[in-house]
Image (cartoon, rainbow, N blue to C red):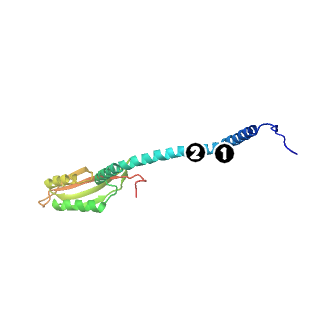
Amino acid sequence: MAIETGLEGKPWYMAAGVGLLLTIAVVVALKYIKFNDMNGQIVRKERKLQTLEREINEGRAAMKSLPQFREEVGRLQLELDKLLRILPSRRNTEDLLRRIRRLTEQGNFDLLRFTPKALSQRDFYSEWPIQIQLNGQYHNLALFFDRIRRFSRIINVEDLRLNAMPGRSRHTISARFTIKTFIYNRPPEESG
């Protein structure tokens, strides 16, 4: 059984033309089916490549500014260190006692009491009162307060009470007062 194509008795170039048309139809169908999917993949890959190139360019720009950022971080760290000397993040009782004791020795005082009290929590800091009692001379007390004023950390003097010393002792006054210093409360994510 033979398939009749209707090309018997026709010139050979007609059969060649029909064959060429069928070949073109098959190639176009394959291109449409197979190559359309590949074209979609190529377009997606080109978009991804453009996105990656943009990110690379942003990274290069950031890399160029990295020395400036490091310099800024260093400057800010110095500023933070300076501020933490003014408003430290811990009590450091021993250092403060040593410094007060040194001031009392320089001023020829008798340090009778140095009593740290409980912290009083505020918004981003805590108040730390310390009661002090000492005997000395009035002029030296003014120098003592002036030297406390020169400490790097913030210290306020409150509730000053002066009493004259009886008799002819080497000290002329007894002073009771509270120095109040402050402690920075670090947020939990800064602690470490």
Residue 178 marker: none
Instruction: Report which quarter residue 2 is drawn in.
Output: top right
Give the side of residue 151 with respect to residue 137, left or right.
right
Q: Within 10 Å of the Cα at label 1, are there few (<14), some (14-19), or many (20+) other Cα atoms?
A: few
Q: How many marks?
A: 2
Q: Secondary structure at mark 1?
A: helix
Residue 83: x, y in percent? 30, 51
Residue 121: x, y in percent? 38, 51
- Amino acid type of disc 2? Ile
Quadrant where the N terminus lies?
top right
Residue 44: x, y in percent? 57, 44
Instruction: Report which quarter residue 5 is drawn in.
Output: top right
Closer to the N terminus: mark 1 or mark 2? Answer: 1
Residue 131 in view here:
yes
The one of 165 and 127 positioned closer to us in this rendering: 127
Q: Secondary structure at mark 2?
A: helix
Q: Within 10 Å of the Cα at label 2, are there few (<14), some (14-19), or many (20+) other Cα atoms?
A: few
Residue at the spot of label 2? 42
Residue at the spot of label 1? 34
Residue occupying image coordinates x 24% and y 62%: 98
Residue occupying image coordinates x 68% and y 40%: 28
- Amino acid type of disc 1? Lys
Residue 182 in view here:
no
Instruction: Report which quarter residue 85 is drawn in.
Output: bottom left
